[in-house]
Amino acid sequence: MTLEEEIKQTKFKSQTQKAVINILFTAGWISNDHHRFFKKYDISSQQFNILRILRGQNGNPASMSLLQDRMLDRMSNASRLVEKLKQKGLVDRSECIIDRRQVDVLITRKGLDLLDEIGLKLDSNLIENITNEEALTLNKILDKFRG
């Protein structure tokens, strides 16, 4: 369905304005889709993002500031997200040996298993109707857009 059909607007000031509105609309659409998808696993997309960052640490602990810096949604509260993941047994949190003011966060085996389970389904759930070549072009345009 076209943007015009989705938001019931036929005229835009320019193609640039339409592109920005299309990006915002599509971001909301993806966010809603992710919300429904992750709800089945009792986590949020922000919690999933934390788990992926921790998996990328390859067994090394991550500080709260590292997590905050790498998160896709920089407005999220990393401490609150980590606490919820800890309550679910998906991460461990401990005082840093070197700096007692810092907290070290590690993903648990349960967290890694959940990522494996979600990963296969998420990849096929996301963008089914564009090719890899189109995705490459889209990535280049979005990177250029943020310039």
Image (tube, rainbow, N blue to C red):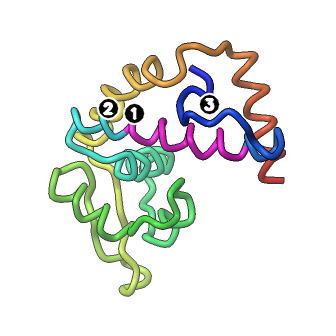
- Residue 33 badge: 1
The residue lying toward the viewer, choosing from 126 and 24, is 24
Residue 46 spot, x, y in % from top left:
39, 52
- Above or below 123: residue 139: below
- For the residues bearing labels 1 and 3, Cβ distance under 8 angstroms: no
Q: Residues within 10 Å of mark 3 (few under 14, many from 20)?
A: some
- Above or below 63: residue 131: above
For mark 3, give the secondary structure: helix
For mark 1, give the secondary structure: helix
Q: Which residue shows up at 15% across the image and 58% down it? A: 87
Q: Would you identify the image quadrant in which residue 101 lies?
A: bottom left
27 magenta-colored: yes
- Residue 37 badge: 2
Taking 4 as reference, is 127 left or right?
A: left
Say which quadrant the N terminus sits in.
top right
Q: Which residue shows up at 50% across the image and 45% down it? A: 56
The residue lying toward the viewer, choosing from 84 and 30, is 30
Q: Nearer the viewer, mark 1 or mark 3?
A: 3
As measured in the structure, the alpha-carbon distance from the residue carrying label 2 to the one carrying label 3 is 23 Å
The residue lying toward the viewer, choosing from 27 and 94, is 27
Q: Which residue is mark 3?
A: 3
Q: Which residue shows up at 54% across the image and 53% down it? A: 72
Residue 66 spot, x, y in % from top left:
52, 66
Type of the residue with mark 2 = Phe
As measured in the structure, the alpha-carbon distance from the residue carrying label 1 to the one carrying label 3 is 17 Å
Taking 62 as reference, is 87 left or right?
A: left
- For the residues bearing labels 1 and 2, Cβ distance under 8 angstroms: yes
Taking 42 as reference, is 112 left or right?
A: right
Q: Which residue shows up at 42% across the image and 60% down it? A: 61
Type of the residue with mark 3 = Leu
Residue extent of the magenta highlight: 20-34
For mark 2, give the secondary structure: helix
